């Protein structure tokens, strides 16, 4: 499809989504499912308008999915304002590390004994399909900074942590295939790919997020500088945290998530220093209706530089800008995913593998990972169900392909991953509204 056709198609779809946002929000399905269905209609299976060979464009697709995931991870970190001392944090940590590791293990067994994959490839498949997705799970994530609902908070935190926590398993699988140095007895894998890469990423992201927040707020409050630059700040912090983490041979996904968390918790710490009546529930201070553009600019500067409003105003602006980027990335990549579905990127094995993952492996991993966790209440079965697979899985697939995965394995893993992600978007997308209504009814 030509560039002109791409532009025309994207323009029509984006304008259409902009004109009927309320209708889309009220629809009993996620926007990702809508984008996917449109992509499937345009794919070689139907109108054959979009035709993109994933193996021929794996480098480009790796970069596109990479960008989409880090944008979403930063937004995810910004949403999570609950103090780290709160015991609710243990739930997403257990999901992201214990439950995900169990999922990788069970998917590896399925890969070896049911799909007859080599052990290394089976581990890679497990790592690809184990992380839940921060991009496509927005309908079941926290809706605002003060949202500490057990279900939404757990799923949000899990999606933030496990996209980085899956990386060691990808590297282990590549190493077993002879495509990565594991070291004698696996010492290098454990020391570098597990301990260093995870620890360094968290430290880098936390430092950058904290220092950036304090510097920007100091400049705005004391010098009235750095005002109106929230878009540059968002992109700069995302790119900086990700790039520095990769240069230090650590995981950029975790660094970006940690940067968003640190930024949000720096805001919370500075807000809590204010008198209690100033700590309002709203995400950002309300801006009065201005009469002129000049007055509007003056009001924005007053909110951005005021001691009592600057921190919340900063967070509100960052979230608005980042969520706009996130929606755009979701639209583009899910549409492209649907357009890439063909007989070559679909496998009927997914018709039994998807139920195995969604209905047996995921619930069992969640049940074991959350043993003894009483604080989640009635949310356990809903947490088990909403293990949405999406763009993070696609990124790991293309990452493995770009690390010289043999063509026969690349073709097989591509078909499995594409099929599982498509089924997840559709099945979870159409079940979101009824499931959340049932959850809210039970939680009352």
Image (cartoon, rainbow, N blue to C red):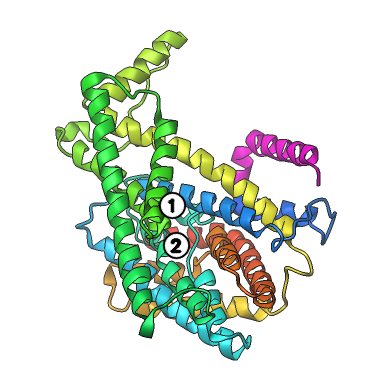
- Look at the numbered disc 2 and give the secondary structure of its residue: helix
The secondary structure making up most of the magenta span is helix
Q: Is residue 63 left or right of residue 235?
A: right
Residue 215, how many percent across, how many down?
25, 33
Q: In which quarter of the image is residue 121?
A: bottom right
Residue depicted at 61% across the width and 88% down the height: 114
Q: In this view, does 310 lie to the left or right of 124?
A: left
Q: Residues within 10 Å of mark 1 (few under 14, many from 20)?
A: many
Q: Are marks 2 and 1 in contact (CB under 8 Å)?
A: yes
Q: In which quarter of the image is residue 37?
A: bottom right
Residue depicted at 49% across the width and 83% down the height: 106
Residue 439, how many percent across, how many down?
44, 62
Residue depicted at 26% across the width and 47% down the height: 207
- Look at the numbered disc 1 and give the secondary structure of its residue: helix
- Residue 222 visible in image: yes
Residue with the mark numbered 1:
73
Disc with the residue nearer the chain's start (2 vs 1): 1
Q: Residues within 10 Å of mark 2 (few under 14, many from 20)?
A: many
- Tell me the quadrant of the picture where the C terminus can be found: bottom left
Q: In this view, does 272 lie to the left or right of 174?
A: left
Of residues 199 and 103, the one nearer the viewer is: 199
Residue 385, how many percent across, how many down?
50, 70
Above or below 286: residue 367: below
User: What stretch of residues is rendered in magenta?
Assistant: 1-26
Above or below 412: residue 376: above
């Amino acid at each position: 499809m030509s560039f002109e056709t791409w532009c025309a198609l994207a323009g029509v779809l984006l304008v259409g989504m902009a004109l009927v946002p309320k209708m889309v929000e009220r629809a009993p399905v996620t926007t990702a499912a809508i984008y996917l269905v449109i992509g499937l209609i345009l794919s070689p299976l139907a109108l054959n308008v979009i035709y993109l060979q994933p193996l021929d464009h794996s480098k480009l697709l790796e970069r596109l999915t990479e960008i989409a995931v880090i944008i979403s991870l930063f937004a995810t970190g910004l949403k999570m304002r609950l103090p780290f001392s709160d015991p609710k944090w243990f739930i997403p940590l257990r999901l992201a590390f214990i439950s995900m590791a169990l999922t990788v293990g069970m998917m590896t067994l399925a890969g070896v004994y049911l799909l007859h994959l080599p052990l290394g490839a089976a581990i890679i498949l497990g790592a690809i399909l184990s992380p839940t997705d921060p991009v496509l799970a927005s309908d079941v994530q926290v809706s605002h900074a003060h949202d500490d609902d057990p279900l939404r908070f757990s799923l949000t935190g899990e999606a933030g942590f496990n996209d980085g926590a899956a990386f060691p398993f990808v590297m282990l699988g590549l190493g077993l295939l002879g495509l990565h140095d594991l070291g004698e007895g696996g010492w290098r894998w454990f020391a570098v790919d597990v301990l260093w890469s995870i620890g360094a990423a968290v430290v880098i992201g936390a430092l950058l997020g904290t220092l950036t927040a304090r510097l920007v707020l100091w400049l705005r409050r004391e010098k009235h500088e750095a005002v109106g630059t929230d878009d540059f700040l968002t992109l700069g912090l995302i790119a900086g945290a990700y790039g520095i983490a990769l240069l230090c041979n650590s995981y950029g996904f975790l660094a970006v998530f940690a940067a968003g968390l640190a930024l949000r918790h720096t805001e919370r710490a500075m807000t809590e220093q204010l008198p209690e009546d100033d700590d309002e529930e709203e995400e950002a201070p309300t801006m009065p209706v201005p009469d002129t553009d000049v007055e509007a600019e003056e009001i924005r500067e007053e909110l951005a530089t005021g001691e009592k409003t600057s921190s919340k105003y900063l967070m509100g602006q960052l979230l608005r800008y980042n969520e706009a980027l996130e929606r755009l990335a979701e639209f583009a990549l899910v549409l492209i995913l649907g357009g890439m579905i063909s007989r070559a990127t679909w496998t009927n094995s997914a018709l039994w593998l998807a139920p195995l993952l969604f209905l047996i492996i995921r619930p069992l991993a969640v049940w074991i990972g959350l043993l003894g966790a009483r604080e989640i209440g009635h949310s356990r079965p809903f947490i088990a169900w909403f293990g949405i697979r999406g763009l993070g899985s696609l990124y790991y697939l293309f990452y493995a392909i770009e690390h010289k995965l043999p063509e026969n394995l690349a073709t097989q893993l591509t078909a499995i991953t594409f099929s599982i992600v498509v089924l997840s978007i559709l099945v979870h997308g159409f079940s979101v509204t009824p499931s959340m209504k049932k959850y809210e009814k039970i939680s009352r």
